[in-house]
Image: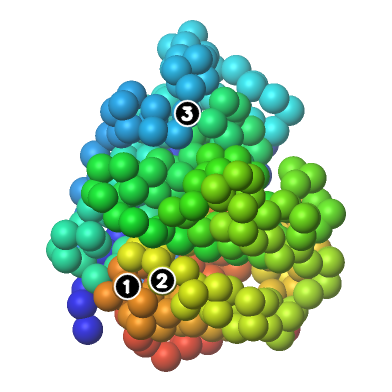
């Protein structure tokens, strides 16, 4: 089986402020668990580059980019009640977006078969004109736009299983027929978007598919969405690359949401998506970390997804998991 790559850089830990749930400790917990389990040593490291301004402008406005940079250079500040910029946040955000670009190119060039990007700050709430929801730049949207505009792919799909709707990703491609966006998320919930009725605009009508879920959904409900809706949609669309916004805050242990997905559920979703990538696009799948705020659940769920990408059996649930 082709190797699985990963992206990580210590600079991602420099995006930090006290008392915020989207903290460096999240990523430290994941990396430590992957090291202790021995899984990290079986992956191929992909050295991330920094995204350029031109890369960011594939999705974001010049004014938005300049604002994030200016706030960081001035020592940091809160952009809204949820979203902060620290002194090195702009640097970290460039390397997070660049990590997605590097991993995507590595997969498209056949250097690795698939990849998981252990990056932060996360990205899927950042719209073309606004940083929000813990997110500065939309890492996955930038990678998708790069694949379409620079790598000449004709069809790219983004699957988003974060518990929050990926409003920024949806906004970036709402009129784009070459991009299929499918999201499962708790609804109604932050950021307020993601209803069934949001299906795209103009030439992009029908390429946005929202699967809003009420609180309390378990593995069975999530897998039904993927097997009965996402799977046939992907087969019909036939993407040449599958990108995944991998948020783990639908886990039953997560403190910020009310869904009841478990670690095995994440494994089975990832295995289903990997099988579809094998069938439809030569196994080309790139996952990137979004949310997930219980550190133990996050670490074990990321491990489960990487196991699925590698073709490993499901290992086990975290100690004490119900």
C-alpha distance separating marks 1 and 3: 28 Å
Q: Is mark 1 in CB contact (under 8 Å) with mark 2? A: yes
* Residue 232 located left or right of residue 150: right
Q: Which residue extends farthest top?
A: 74
* Nearest to N terminus: mark 3 or mark 2: 3
Residue occupying the far front of the picture: 203
1 vs 3, front mark: 1
Which dot, 1 or 2, sits closer to the camera?
A: 2
On the image, numbered disc 2 is attached to which residue? 238
| Residue occupied by mark 1 | 281
Instruction: Report the quarter where the C terminus lies.
Output: bottom right
Question: Residue tagged by mark 3?
Answer: 60
Q: CA distance from mark 1 to mark 2?
A: 8 Å
- Looking at the image, tell me whether mark 1 or mark 3 is earlier in sequence order: 3
Q: Position of residue 98 (x, y in %)?
A: 31, 40
Q: Is residue 227 above or below residue 152?
A: below
Residue situated in front as seen by the camera: 14 or 7 = 7
The percent coordinates of residue 125 (x first, y second) are 61, 41
Circles 1, 3 touching at the beta carbon (< 8 Å): no
Looking at the image, residue 273 lies above or below residue 311: above
């Amino acid at each position: 089986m082709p190797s699985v790559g990963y992206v990580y850089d210590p600079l991602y830990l420099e995006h930090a402020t006290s008392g915020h749930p989207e903290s460096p400790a999240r990523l430290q917990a994941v990396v430590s668990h992957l090291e202790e389990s021995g899984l990290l040593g079986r992956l191929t490291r992909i050295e991330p580059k920094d995204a350029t301004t031109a890369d960011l402008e594939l999705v974001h406005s010049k004014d938005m980019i300049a604002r994030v940079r200016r706030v960081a250079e001035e020592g940091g500040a809160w952009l809204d009640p949820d979203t902060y910029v620290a002194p090195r946040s702009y640097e970290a955000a460039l390397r997070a977006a660049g990590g997605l670009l590097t991993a995507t190119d590595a997969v498209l060039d056949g250097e690795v078969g698939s990849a998981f990007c252990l990056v932060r700050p996360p990205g899927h709430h950042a719209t073309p004109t606004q940083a929000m929801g813990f997110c500065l730049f939309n890492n996955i949207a930038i990678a998708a736009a790069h694949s379409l505009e620079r790598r000449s792919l004709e069809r790219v799909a983004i699957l988003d299983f974060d518990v929050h709707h990926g409003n920024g990703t949806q906004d970036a491609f709402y009129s784009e027929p070459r991009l299929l966006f499918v999201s499962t998320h708790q609804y109604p919930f932050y950021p307020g978007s993601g209803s069934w009725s949001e299906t795209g605009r103009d030439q992009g009508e029908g390429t946005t598919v929202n699967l809003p879920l009420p609180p309390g959904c378990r593995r069975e409900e999530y897998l039904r969405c993927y097997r009965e809706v996402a799977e046939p949609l992907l087969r019909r669309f036939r993407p040449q690359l599958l990108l995944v916004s991998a948020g783990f805050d639908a886990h039953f242990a997560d403190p910020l949401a009310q869904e009841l997905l478990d670690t095995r559920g994440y494994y089975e979703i990832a295995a289903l998506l990997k099988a579809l990538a094998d069938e439809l696009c030569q196994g080309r799948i790139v996952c990137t970390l979004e949310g997930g705020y219980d550190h133990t659940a996050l670490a074990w769920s990321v491990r489960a997804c990487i196991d699925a990408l590698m073709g490993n059996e499901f290992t086990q649930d975290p100690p004490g998991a119900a």
